Amino acid sequence: MYSGKVGPISEEVIKTLTEEGDIELDADSRDEAVLDVQSVLKEYLRMEREVGDEARDLLARRGQDHTAFGRTKRKIAEGRGFGLGEDGIGWIADQLLDMMMHSAHIEEIFSEDHEIRSKIAKVLRRHMSTDEDLDREVRRRIKNLQEGTDSWDIEYEKVSAALRKLQGLDG
């Protein structure tokens, strides 16, 4: 998930849950409820970045190359009870549901937990499919470089940043 997606995802989560009668907001609290959702999504991004940084540091200390990055990152995330990828969707949905239970901006919750989690996950998956499309496009553009090398990492970030900016995904 990219930072530029936080606002649209937050809006859509609140819109979906209110329009489908899962939650009821205080009349003047819609914007604050959206901000509550944004705070959970921003925390996810912060934690994901922190786990990635820790994985890079660990690989550097061990003298390992980047090919072990994904596996190392997943192990660190698991140790923290944090989800990545599909597990990240479940983690975010759980955090959002917990936030809603305690939010002063959500008047009432009418649906079962599993129904709300499912609707949140559907919104997240729809937005994250764009992330996968972006990743495929970046990889297509740098296919001449060997993955796991420093030059691949640098070029991946450069091309990814340019495409995100072009598509308005960074905010």
Image (cartoon, helix red, strand yellow):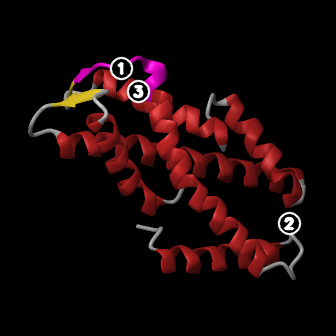
Judged by depth in the image, the label closer to the viewer, 2 or 3, is: 3
Q: Quadrant of the N terminus?
A: bottom right
For residue 138, side relative to residue 102 (left or right): right
- Asked if labels 3 and 1 touch by Cβ distance under 8 angstroms, the answer is no
The stretch of residues the image draws in magenta is 108-116
Q: Position of residue 73 (x, y in %)?
A: 74, 45
Q: Residues within 10 Å of mark 1 (few under 14, many from 20)?
A: some
What amino acid is at disc 1? Ser
Q: Is residue 74 visible?
A: yes
Query: Which mark is on residue 97?
Result: 3
Residue at the disc numbered 1: 111
* Cα gap from disc 2 to disc 1, whole angstroms: 45 Å
Q: Position of residue 58 (x, y in %)?
A: 78, 48
User: Residue 112 colored magenta?
Assistant: yes
Q: Residues within 10 Å of mark 3 (few under 14, many from 20)?
A: some
View extreme (left): residue: 28
Query: Which mark is on residue 148?
Result: 2
Judged by depth in the image, the label closer to the viewer, 2 or 1, is: 1
Disc 1, SS = loop
Disc 2, SS = loop
Residue shown at the point (31%, 41%) measured from the top left: 14
Query: Which mark is on residue 15?
Result: none
Q: Position of residue 117 (x, y in %)?
A: 48, 28
